Every structure is written in C-alpha cells, then in structure tokens.
Image (spheres, rainbow, N blue to C red):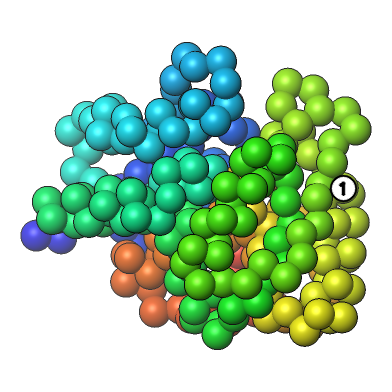
C-alpha cells in the first residue's frame, strides 16, 4: 500500500546522523528537496573516543531506528561514513542485507559513494580528507578493499577547530582544498574527487568548483541514493551536473 504523507510526495526517508553533526540535516534537506519527507534520528553514544563512538553507531543502529517509533518508514540513510570505514565493507554489507531481509532499505553513505563512483565509471580517485590520521587510514583501506585506487589525498586542516575540527570547517578551507584537489586530479588523470565525511560542509565549495571530472561528497552521494530508492531515476551524472535541482536551492 502506498503511504500518504502531508509533506513529501515522492516519499519519506529516515536519516541517522551522529549526535554532534550539524551538517547532515541542512545539506540533506537541500539535496533531497521538498518532495521528500526527511525525518532524522541523532545517534548518541557516550564513549569519549571518536573511533569508539563511530563503531558504536554501527553496532547500535537497530536502537536508533527504533527511535522513529510508529512512523511507517521503510528507507533509512545512514549518514556516517566513518562508521563504515572502521567496521569494514563486509560488516557494513551484512547490516544492509539484514535489513533488506526484513523489507527495509538501509543505505549507508559509503555504499552510496560506491554506487556513484560506479555510475560515473570512476576507479582512480583523489580524496579530500578532513579526518585525523587513524580514521583517514581506515578510510583508505576501505576504498582499496572495494576496488578503488586512492591516487592522492588532500588533507583539510582546521586552524580553529572549536568543539569539533570537522564540523567547524569553513567554506573557504574546503574550497581551497578542492581547488588543490582538482589540479592534482588533472596531473594524475584521476576519474573523480571525493570529499569524504558527512560532517564536512561541502555544498557551497562543490557548487563553486569548476572541475573537469565528477566532484562530490558523502552527503551528495547519500541523498542521490535516497531519491533513487524512492523511485527517482536520476543518474549520477545528472545529479552532479550544473543544472541539478539541488544547486538551485543553495
């Protein structure tokens, strides 16, 4: 039976985001558009260590989904790439398949990135990285394990990290990193540029960069997959193109 929503004629998604992340909701709202009802759950874990919290988010995902209560959602977007990098692609896929067996579509940001890279026929990637060294290393291991070649990494460092170095990155810092990444990608004949991490605000920078190859972020890929799961046939190249609807909403 088709569900009817007062808001969101295309459908509804439940978005799971880390509790301190201020980026996922505003970016996904702009990306998904007014025809998608977006409800969110903020994943909380008290572990003091970042990596421990990220692993806990993946391990406790059933509880976070339960927090939506009786809302009849069947599509969920897991907006935390760091968790998937740390648990690895096999454990990530087991979670996705477990939900699929119960009739629930569970899309991880990392799976969405993989789908977008495949859709644009990209294998060699330049990564724009906001992570600390230990998490960054896990992300590179993940991409190599699933068949992508990380040809270069451009680190984005925050001179004024505030409460969280990733969440407080400014547009100019990200834009400068993207300009550098595009030059390197051209020199190395990379196929695409990936801005990893759902907490790094990237939409203004991605929208403003004049790149000769696909440039996208975790949230851009995740929202694209979310719409596709709701029946939007948009291709990755259309979604990343200059006339994409989300660009007009910035």
Which residue is outermost to the left? 1
The answer to whether residue 184 of the structure is visible from this angle is: yes
Q: Residue at x 20, y 50 (%)?
A: 99
Q: Residue at x 15, y 60 (%)?
A: 2
Instruction: Where is residue 243? Give x, y as percent.
Output: 66, 78
Q: Residue at x 55, y 85 (%)?
A: 121
Instruction: Where is residue 187? Give x, y as percent.
Output: 87, 80
Q: Nearer the viewer, residue 210 or 32?
A: 210
Which quadrant is the C terminus positioned in?
bottom right
On screen, residue 184 above or below 200? below
- Residue 71 placement: quadrant: top left
For label 1, the crowd category at 10 Å Cα-Cα, with few meaning under 14, some 14 to 19 and many 20 or more, is: some
Q: Of helix, strand and loop, which one carries label 1? A: helix
The answer to whether residue 5 of the structure is visible from this angle is: no
Instruction: Where is residue 197? Give x, y as percent.
Output: 62, 47
Residue named by callout 1: 173
Q: How many marks overall?
A: 1
Side of 100 where 174 appears, left or right: right
Q: Nearer the viewer, residue 146 or 162?
A: 146
Which quadrant is the N terminus positioned in?
bottom left
On screen, residue 119 above or below 160? below
Side of 19 where 200 appears, left or right: right
Q: Residue at x 55, y 62 (%)?
A: 143
Side of 235 where 201 appears, left or right: right
């Amino acid at each position: 039976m088709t569900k009817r929503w007062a808001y969101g004629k295309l459908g509804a998604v439940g978005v799971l985001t880390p509790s301190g992340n201020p980026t996922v909701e505003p970016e996904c709202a702009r990306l998904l558009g007014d025809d998608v009802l977006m409800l969110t759950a903020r994943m909380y874990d008290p572990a003091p260590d970042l990596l421990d919290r990220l692993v806990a988010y993946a391990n406790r995902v059933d509880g976070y989904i339960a927090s939506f209560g009786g809302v009849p959602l069947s599509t969920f977007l897991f907006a935390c790439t760091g968790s998937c990098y740390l648990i690895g692609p096999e454990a990530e896929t087991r979670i996705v398949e477990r939900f699929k067996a119960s009739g629930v579509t569970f899309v991880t940001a990392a799976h969405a990135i993989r789908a977008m890279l495949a859709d644009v026929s990209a294998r060699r990637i330049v990564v724009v990285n906001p992570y600390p060294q230990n998490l960054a290393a896990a992300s590179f291991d993940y991409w190599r394990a699933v068949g992508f070649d990380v040809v270069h990494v451009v680190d984005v460092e925050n001179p004024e990290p505030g409460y969280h170095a990733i969440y407080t990155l400014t547009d100019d810092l990200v834009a400068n990193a993207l300009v550098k990444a595009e030059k390197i990608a051209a020199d190395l004949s990379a196929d695409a540029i990936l801005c990893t991490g759902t907490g790094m605000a990237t939409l203004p920078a991605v929208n403003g960069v004049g790149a000769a190859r696909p440039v996208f972020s975790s949230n851009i890929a995740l929202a694209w997959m979310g719409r596709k799961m709701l029946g939007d046939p948009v291709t990755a190249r259309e979604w990343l193109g200059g006339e994409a609807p989300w660009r007009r909403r910035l």
